[in-house]
Amino acid sequence: MNWSALEALVSGVNKYSTAFGRVWLSMVFVFRVLVFVVAAQRVWGDENKDFVCNTEQPGCSNVCYDHIFPISHIRLWALQLIFVTCPSLMVMWHVKYRENRNRKYTASHKGAHLYANPGKKRGGLWWTYLTSLIFKAGFDAGFLYILYYIYEGYDMPRLSKCTLEPCPNTVDCYISRPTEKRIFTLFMVVSSAACIFMCICEMLYLVCKRIHKRMKIEAERSQTLAEMAPLTAPRSEFMSKTSIRVDTTVSMHNISNNITAKESSEKK
């Protein structure tokens, strides 16, 4: 398989990813794909040829090999890497869809833009990105469980006993280079666990950032309403302050009478 083409395709998601996403992508292609292509395939390349059982019964070695290795580690890891990297393409497709809509909108509305930044994680793109993280972590965890369930752990025994037909009795079978295979198995398991941890950290980062942004918007809205409250007093309060009315004509008449009486008294 051409892993470089997949790397070039998935690396396009880097510009839409957070710092956690960039670290995750580096871990996948440096610690998993590179190790898988350069070393792991060579280590497991002789597993069938050098699998030896202490019997010459025809078909016994093949049956025991199929029982001990139901699926090759190499093929299982290849499927895991494909399934884990594919959810990142969801984000790329969503961004391309936004860019296409924005292009059509700009052409029909004389330069106006539907999205200020099509790659910004808002609205549906935020949910697409979060869903891709859930799928990536879920696929990694699922394949780790499958590997543990099929081989009953992550160990690679030096000796395996087989009692299946057509073997005449309990047969001892030996795996080639079990220590080296055990080391690579544990390395791939730890790398997968680290990638799951990075996905969980990125999910928590996105959710906490969104909650913080909502709380900030609500706080600004409350502050704006509090500043506008004195300028718009309630109608009931305004009416209560102006409920006492003064007859200005009566007041002026009384004042003029008082002035006339005072002048007449002074003349007297």
Image (cartoon, rainbow, N blue to C red):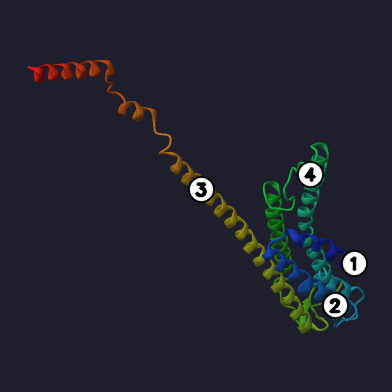
Real-space Cα distance between discs 4 and 2?
43 Å
Earlier sequence position, callout 4 versus callout 3: 4
Q: Relative to 221, say whether 171 is above or below.
A: below
Q: Relative to 5, say whether 163 is above or below.
A: below
Q: Which residue is mark 2?
A: 38
Badge 1 element? loop
Earlier sequence position, callout 3 versus callout 1: 1
Q: Tell me the quarter of the picture where residue 176 sits.
A: bottom right
Q: Relative to 61, say whether 84 is above or below.
A: above
Name the residue: 64% across, 62% down: 202
Residue type of the residue flagged with mark 1: Asn
Badge 3 element? helix
193 left or right of 257 in image: right
Q: Which residue is mark 3?
A: 220
The residue carrying pointer 1 sits among few (fewer than 14), some (14 to 19) or many (20 or more) residues within 10 Å by Cα, namely few
Q: Which residue is mark 1?
A: 2
CB-based contact (under 8 Å), mark 3 and mark 1: no
For the question of whether residue 164 can be seen, the reply is no
Q: Nearer the viewer, mark 1 or mark 4?
A: 4
CB-based contact (under 8 Å), mark 4 and mark 2: no
Earlier sequence position, callout 4 versus callout 2: 2
Real-space Cα distance between discs 2 and 1?
13 Å
Q: Nearer the viewer, residue 42 or 212?
A: 212
Residue type of the residue flagged with mark 3: Glu
The residue carrying pointer 2 sits among few (fewer than 14), some (14 to 19) or many (20 or more) residues within 10 Å by Cα, namely few
1 left or right of 246 in image: right
Q: Position of residue 139 (x, y in %)?
A: 73, 60
Q: Which residue is mark 4?
A: 102
